Image: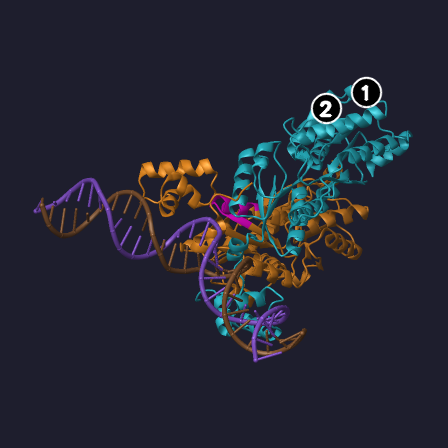
Chain colours: A cyan, B orange, C purple, D brown
Amino acid sequence: MGRRPTIIDVARLAGVSKSTAARALSDSPDVNDATRDKVRKAAVASGYERNHLAVGMRSGRSGLFGLVIPDITNPFWAEVARGAQDIVGENDASLLVFSSDWDHEREATHLRALRQARVEGAIVNPVSDNAEDFGRFGVPFSLIGSSAERFPDTPSIGSDIRQAVRLGLDHLVARGHAAPALILGPKSRLARARFLRSVHEHCIERDIDPAVLQVEDGDYTFEGGHAAMQRLLARQSGGHLTVFCANDLMALGAMLAVREAGRECPRDVSILGFDGVPAGAFSWPGLTTIEKPARELGRRAAQALFDEIAGRPQDGRTYLPCRLIERGSLADLRVQTPLRVAGAGRS
Amino acid sequence: MGRRPTIIDVARLAGVSKSTAARALSDSPDVNDATRDKVRKAAVASGYERNHLAVGMRSGRSGLFGLVIPDITNPFWAEVARGAQDIVGENDASLLVFSSDWDHEREATHLRALRQARVEGAIVNPVSDNAEDFGRFGVPFSLIGSSAERFPDTPSIGSDIRQAVRLGLDHLVARGHAAPALILGPKSRLARARFLRSVHEHCIERDIDPAVLQVEDGDYTFEGGHAAMQRLLARQSGGHLTVFCANDLMALGAMLAVREAGRECPRDVSILGFDGVPAGAFSWPGLTTIEKPARELGRRAAQALFDEIAGRPQDGRTYLPCRLIERGSLADLRVQTPLRVAGAGRS
DNA sequence: GCATCTATTGGGAACGTTACCGGAAGTCTC
DNA sequence: GAGACTTCCGGTAACGTTCCCAATAGATGC
């Protein structure tokens, strides 16, 4: 095998000094065209490839960026990762990807790993509001997700929850639904409060007393949504039940619970999700949901990071609009003819 | 902010030389316990953190590993990534993740990036059989997936397609199905041939003429499976149709096509998938499928890489067994009573 | 023709770490 | 009590790159 050729080998082969070789290879203007050509040829001839470790060590630019998300296995975060990956790749850098599993300790470990790898910057969805950790992080970073509000100085990207909730509630009202029951995430998560607050605000705008809303807690998993819906169903006296879930996975779990209870969606129960995961299109009925622009979130977070590092002016916090995807999990309660309803339930 | 403390700062603070400080911090036995303690205290006091770039440069061990998969957004590959991530993390290293989009050029670019980042090793699902690229790769690597057979010298992990197909065909036969129609991937992909070959082998074992099998090509996407099923449906004269799809996404697309055609799964059409993506559990009916051990694939590929690097003996190619997941997309054709069949279709 | 300027190049030093070598004590052996 | 051996430590040289400074040669200005 032999060792990898270094710039010194290239220089020797081209008959110049290593300084000149370095200049030629880094497109410096201070080098004669003929020389540059000679060096380039020598580089490809020897199979030379820049050692990024050495570059990073000398110049401080490692070409490495970090991404810390809860779970790469979660389709939403996978999309975010892909968006970040694309932008980082366009800038000739590489992305270190970590999954924190919503665990403080793991998050801290990953941040440390990022620091030790001397990443130029990081994109993080913070597990929670441990502002201290980030105050001392020592690496430029941009935040993603709803828990980022605690950091006014750092660029952060999130989806516009208020707009999203408005979208959902407007749609519900338009289809004749009353105030929906809510299946939320665990109390420990900031996103929960944010979502709930938005729902309350929009309820008040519509003269609905927020106290009326039934609330069940899930844990953002399929199983959690399933259990929450079972509780909701057990409590329900009769009539149509409308449920707004804080994420799609729980909505899908809820849908299963409905079927298991011998009820039918959307005939007996209407379900509105939130996230826009692909799996929502595969369920039956298809899940009506509010889609967060996941990939764009990742792209923008990465772009914001590059802007921040380059010293370009920042927007601070950015909220990206969400989009309603109508599939089949929401009944149209405006039509009161029993015949139509029965027909809708069967098809 | 000031600059990051170096080991020299630590040494100065502890009143020792940097060699001693380095030894103390790297758990070398050649250092007095009292001294080690002193150095450790100085390290935490100054907030010292090893510079992995410098370590990598000097020792050749960058603490970086690479993963090149088709698409992190694909749930199967996300699981693989997670498995690799876990093992790499356990070894105190970090993982660079790239998506190749099944594109030769992108793959080559990523491999180059990996080399320049001086990763200690890489896990790759090769886009195709471009053996040359890997011959010159110059970095230890392990292969993952079915196209890895061309590299007898490198460790590679795949799922046991033959066993998986046997599992599927046995299950089909046990439930009274005749030879299934096949929805395969594109001809350009090696996995297609591998899958088809296994099906043929098992058909011959069962005295079924492989020429009898209907075959449709998809492209491993939801839409592709949808279109393929439409073609199948259009050709079908009558009776129960059984379809074995080469992956779950196509199976899910096929399921939609069935519904759109006014047919019902599993009453009129039985669908067997392959992959075991979570979305298969959310469809209705749930997708009966053969689950590849995706996360374990990632773990084993990473482990094989570490073993390879450490010079531990290798198994060469490893095939991991798959598992049948029974959900509801397969009719039981043994029961000929019309009443029962109708009942199954309705529930 | 001499000073000045420009274009191009070479020669170090530095980045932060680890590997290697040699030295200074202390301990042991007989 | 002298040599050998062990334990611990400091000094220095790398690793491969970029950055800075000086040097050379030719061109230009007067």
Residue of label 1: A209
At 38% from the left edge and 39% from the top edge, which residue is drawn? B14
> What's drawn in magenta, residue-wise?
B82-95
Q: Amino acid at mark 2?
A: Val
What is the secondary structure assignment of the residue under circle 2?
Answer: strand
> Along the line of sight, which residue is nearer the eye, A38 or B295?
A38
Camera-nearest residue between B8 and A178: B8
Task: Work out whether residue B68 can be spotted.
Answer: yes
Q: In the rendered image, which quarter contains the N terminus of chain B?
A: top right
Verify whether residue B88 appears in magenta: yes
Mark 2 burial class by Cα count in 10 Å: few <14, some 14-19, many 20+: some
Overall secondary structure of the magenta section: helix
Nearer the N terminus, badge 2 or badge 1?
1
Asked if both marks, 2 and 1, belong to the same chain, the answer given is: yes
Q: Position of residue A50 (x, y in %)?
A: 54, 62
Closest to the observer, B305 or B144: B305
Q: Chain of mark 1?
A: A
Give the distance between the C-alpha atoms of the residues marked 2 and 1, in whole angstroms: 13 Å
- Residue beneath the point at 45% across and 53% down: B61
The image shows residue A234, relative to residue A109, as above or below, that is above
Q: Quadrant of the C terminus of chain B?
A: top right
Q: Which mark is residue B214?
A: none
How far across and down, in percent of the image, does residue B316 sit? Answer: 46, 58
Q: Amino acid at mark 1?
A: Asp
Question: Is residue B341 placed above or below A198 in the rendered structure?
Answer: below
Q: How many marks?
A: 2
Q: Any mark on residue A215, and which?
A: 2
Magenta stretch contains residue A259: no
Residue A287 visible in the picture: no
Q: Residues within 10 Å of mark 1 (few under 14, many from 20)?
A: few
Q: Residue at x 59, y 73 (%)?
A: A37
Q: Position of residue A205 (x, y in %)?
A: 84, 26
